[in-house]
Amino acid sequence: MHRKIIAVITVLVFLSAALVGCGQQAAVDKEEEVVKLGCALSMSGLLGPMGTKMTDAVKLAVEEINAAGGINGKQVKLYIEDDATDPAQCLNAVKKLVEANGVQLLITGMSSGAASTIGPYLSERGVLAISPSATSPALTGEPWRDYFFRTVPSDEYQGKVMAQLALDRGLERLVVFAMDNVYGVSLGEVAEQALEEGGAEVVAFIKYDPAKMDYRSELTQIKSLNPDGVIHVGYNDDGVVVYQQALDLGLDTAQWIGCDGVYGTGLFKTEASATFMANAVIGTRPGAPEGEEAYENFVAAYRAEYDADPEVFCDTVYDAVKLIALAAEAAGSEDPAKVRDALLEVGQNYQGASGTITFDEGGDRIGGIYEIWDVVKENGEFKFQRVEKVTVE
Amino acid sequence: MIDTGQILVNSLVTSSLYLLAGTGLTLTFGLSRFPNFAYAELITVGAFCGLLFLAQPGGVFVLALVGAFLVAGLVSASSYSLVFQPLAERKTSLIHLMVASIALGYVLRHTIGEIWGWSAQAYQLMWTVYTIGTVRISSLWIIMIATAVLTAVVLHFFLTRTRTGKAIRAVASNPELASVTGINKQKVILLTWFFGAGLAAVAGVFRAADTRLFPMLGWDILLPIFAVTILGGIGSFYGLIIAALLLGLAENFGVVLLSSIGLSTEYRMAIAFLILITVLIVRPKGLAR
């Protein structure tokens, strides 16, 4: 009796061992066939419209890489997650990609808040990520930056361009009106400092809740201070409401200076917001190197694929994917530590769609191209128009 | 320097929203004795009905308000008869009813998301702005404030002068006694759920017109609405009027205070809740109970 049981158990053990072995073998084979790339940007929430287009640019870059033979002879497999414009959700998405899908190379950290939430985890797990759009100067020099790069210049540059714009227009008394998150406050602070260094006076720095959507009293306070300029840092979603309420309160007598967050057709959702922008708002945003070959090729490819023009950060996210591929090729490996080291090598004077990319030791992009924009109404249609292009070294 | 007149107008706009949105919540809370979290979605349903009615040929704002009122009222009344009444009849606890309402809220919210998408939309309406001295006020804000005042006056007479109104108060204060006196309790409750949700929908249309709309619209303002309901005393309409005014003023003058000392105006809600906590320590049942 005992013998029989032992025999059965032995058979079972062998069988299961064989099965497990097969499973493992299959998994290893499959993993060796592909290079896994994770993409966790915002496809819903405040940044949803922007992030969806950026994800399209990621898909485009991956298709191109695969068509050209992949990375180290292997095809790239793309895993897409949505962080819903929520830093906590971004961490969940990244953890899922890393722990469940086994991804070690990532495009993520769309907002600065998301970037600073996932940064420590990435560093601890030794997983490499590139952000195409986290612009906060506060991210520079963070201890977790060893595995986190960005193909977008820090707002250190944009803040200075905003301040210079105000100074050039002869504005002397300004209010900084910024959404209360990492992006808003740090960009606002850079602008404030640059304004004061330039001799202008910042009479108030008002931080607001981007979800409150009731800004009448903040705007009334600004009006009472009677500034000749307002530096405004917000996103499309709250921007619409800020501008329509500002129009109602008659704040279009001051010159408003916006940023990349308030650039986009989302601002034209209401006539009131569009009218206010045409009356009073000019702004800055990371510019595109029009006329340069890499940029024009990217735009043509994007149009051919999606029948639409690429929007903001589509070029930086496209470059991020291409740089990861290039670095992995150069390293001859997909090991994140090796790719990271190679990234510092290939990321020197790299001619990307978003212009020349050079990383400093801390994984930040040096210098940037900015566009100064305003809003005009032509034949009843509102549209953004470029005023000039500024290159910051 | 403070533009007191303007801040007062701003406060009235905030208060009007809270009053309209809070009325249904406080009355249904008072009658059915549980916090209905799906109430947030009734506000959202109203906002999206408004979008639907405005898109119709000849769609005017008044039509949007009336249409939203009726649709949200029906959704609310049917949710009561299909979900909450059967649960209440089985003597389920407060927690069960509350969780059921959260679940219903999710269903409604995501249904709206599936139909209209998650990105923000807006009503295509332009409002006239009037200037009185230094104070500026848009026609939308005037309509909002007027609707809130009208609602308060009409409800006052409804609750004190009509049979149904008196029945609502009777059921709220003592359900058993009310039943004994021959009041049809279920009918009273159903009617309150209908009209309460209608007013919530009106608030939703106003919120959408004043800002923009997306499936989280109602959820985003549910917290201050619960705050005014509790501050006023659950079930008390008069308490709600005072609470809505108080929180509107606290939030907007709070913004003046916060921005002048350099703090984020996000704390305006914290000021409102500080008042709430203080009042509840002194009067645990709210202002008017």
Image (cartoon, rainbow, N blue to C red):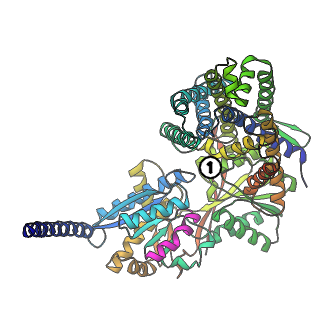
Q: Main secondary structure of the magenta part?
A: helix
The quarter holding residue A329 reads bottom left
The answer to whether residue B54 is visible is yes
Chain letter for the residue marked with disc 1 in the picture: A
Asked whether, in this view, residue A35 is left or right of residue A108, the answer is: left
Up/down of B246 relative to A175, above or below: above
- Front residue (pair A136, A378): A136
Asked whether, in this view, residue A95 is left or right of residue B138, the answer is: left
- Front residue (pair A2, B196): A2
Up/down of A366 relative to A268, above or below: below
Image quarter of the C terminus of chain B: top right
User: Which residue does the numbered mark 1 point to in the structure image?
Assistant: A237
SS at badge 1: helix
Residue A295, percent from left and from top: 47, 63
Range of residues picked out in magenta:
A110-126
**Amino acid type of the residue that numbered disc 1 sits on in the rendered structure:** Asp
